[in-house]
Image (spheres, rainbow, N blue to C red):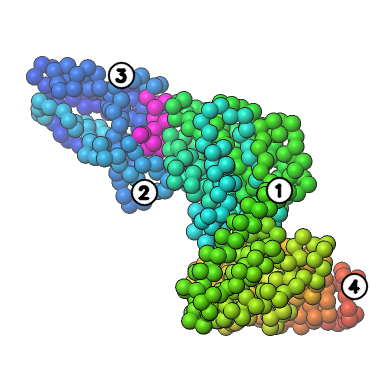
Amino acid sequence: MHGERDGNIAQLPYHKHERKRRNSIGSVSSESKSSEYHGSRRGRSNAVQRADMPNGSRKGNVLTSQNTVRSRSSEVSIVFGYQDLTLSQLKARYWKDCGYHRAECTPILDDTPRIPPSQMGQGMFNGSQNMIFNGGIFTNVILVYEHRGLKLLEKRVAHSAFHNSAQRIDPPRCHPKTRKEVLDNMLEWIMRSERRDEWILWLNGAAGAGKSAIVQTLAERCVAALMAVASFFFFRSDSTRNSISRLVATLAYQLIQAIPEVSGDIQHIVEENPLIFDQDVESQLQQLIIQPYLRLPAHLRRPFVVFIDGLDECLDHIQQTTLIKVFGDISQNHEVSIICLIASRRERQIEAAFGKEHVSDNLRIIPLDELSEEQTSSDIHSYLTDKFDEIKKTHPRKQDLPLNWPHKSSIEGIVKKSSGQFIYAFIVMNFVSTAHTLPLTQLLIIDNIRPRDPTDNPFANLDALYEYIFSKVKHLDFVKSILTMMLIKWDIFGIARPTKIKEYEALFSLQAGDLESLLANLSAVIHCVPNTTTEFKFLHASLGDFLLDPSRSGEYYINSTEQESQLLCIFFESYIPDTQFYDNVGKWRIHAINELLSNAKVTASLQSSILNFQLQNPLPWGSGILYYATLVTAVKHIIMSSTSSPPISRRQISLQLILIIHFLKNL
């Protein structure tokens, strides 16, 4: 559609997202004839200005698209030149280029506009010569593009699932000189250039075998080799990465980073269908990964390597098997060069899913538990030797260590007790290197630890080490409540869950520094660094396995039902609604109470905590309704419980309900 011309004026239609900028410049003429301008735009295509200047410096017909992006307070013009394109071709090129992914551009992955160096300073007449301005008005249409698709995508990304996420503080990596053969073989498989028969690799092994360290190291090496890489590290205690709900969005975001040419396509798909993330994982993968990849020119379809670690930590077994099936289907399409590496424990449902015909045909398996015992022992020995050397150089009490420490027999003993599990050697070295102890004494303790029943339990030595560490914990019951808080599903807190030491101290009404003192003897197995923003967490998932298995942990067993009742008592006794509801701590407590009540065992102490709870001053509507509704639920839970002991007084219940109703009337 041509704009209407009035004399020397060309008016262009514009979209609601566009802004007209009119500049009185004067008429334009060349030595042979006056310039003639036409403009057209439909949908989201770029506005076009056309100049026919046969005697000008630019020969032939020139189509120039000017696209200005406004992000927050900044405004940057980015100009692309197209020659002899029809409107439909221009629209197609626009959608391809809307992510600013030309070869010389940096991909835009946030709200900050970027300009390629070669396009700095370009404008309507940039580079033109022999131009004379004698009056006239020109219309310059500016497109404001907000990157809405990218923003929608970012909201569904699990940032902590990246291999280089800041939230995964000091992730496990293979120690130098260890796992060399495994890493070399896997890297060679990934980088294989000839036609491959296997597109999926399953790395499996028991807890503590070193799977995550291998995946982390491989991902970093592939990135260093400038390969297109995406990763997703599952973690059972993190609601953003203990299911597959955020998996595809996270991979798609990383695909944009790795291959910027897909950016515009993916953003357009998300804009057109914002609810795509509520579809099944197969549909999401097809629309956000496979189709944008296949629409790339052949020379841009470089292999895309996907690392998925800890699939067994996805809480839903059906989701685990579904994900394996979907990647198995993708492996059948040889136009798509997607290489997938999945690491997990060897659990029955996962093994069965990998055994399906359409998956197993394109599958390579590396079982860490079946690797040469000699090679694994050699790797652990190298790790221990280096760590002992480090202790002798850096420990605060290094001057108290003998020159010939440690004895070879001590290192060999640790290697033997490890039974191929790197986690045992890792925890031993954490224990020996504890800053406030003497490493010599700590190593003697390790030498003398003996498992209760070494024959039936493959983790006997690891469990014996855990038992000794917990035997030194003071205030064990209270510490168990804190550990329970770390073990239960974090979904009850939503995204903004407690992760820092100071947040846990506030949640349990502790003073600053109390938590560090309580957990001082657990520093070998729990990351607890005060006055930092680092995450408060278990150093390895095997600790949770130990604590939740009564046959392994004995007196240190955490009975989740009983411990959740104890947590409820703590929260009821420490909650002050009129002062705490509006901060995160108050919200965590009220939501935890709501969730935990459904499964908690009604003990005498819990019953007392609920019925003796002191109602505070009325809260305003909104905050108060949730708070009082929680109390009603709590009292109802006691009434419905047939195991309530001691017997409940009707008078107690009636008084509490009357108080609740009284405050509800005042909302």
Label 3 – label 2 distance at C-alpha: 31 Å
- Contact, mark 3 vs mark 4 (Cβ under 8 Å): no
Precedes in sequence: disc 1 or disc 4:
1
Precedes in sequence: disc 3 or disc 4:
3
- Residue 84's label in the rendered image is 3
Residue identifier under label 1 = 370
- Mark 1 vs mark 4: give the one in front: 1
- Residue 112's label in the rendered image is 2
Q: Is residue 478 magenta?
A: no
| Residue count near mark 3 (Cα–Cα under 10 Å), binned few <14, some 14–19, many ≥20 | few
Q: Amino acid at mark 1?
A: Glu
Precedes in sequence: disc 2 or disc 4:
2
Residue identifier under label 4 = 643
Answer yes or no: is residue 519 visible.
no
What is the secondary structure assignment of the residue under circle 1? helix
Precedes in sequence: disc 1 or disc 2:
2
Q: Tell me which residue sits at (65%, 63%) in the image.
A: 415
Report the quarter where the C terminus lies. Answer: bottom right
- Residue 444's label in the rendered image is none
Answer yes or no: is residue 82 visible.
yes
What is the secondary structure assignment of the residue under circle 3? loop
Q: Tell me which residue sits at (39%, 36%) in the image.
A: 101
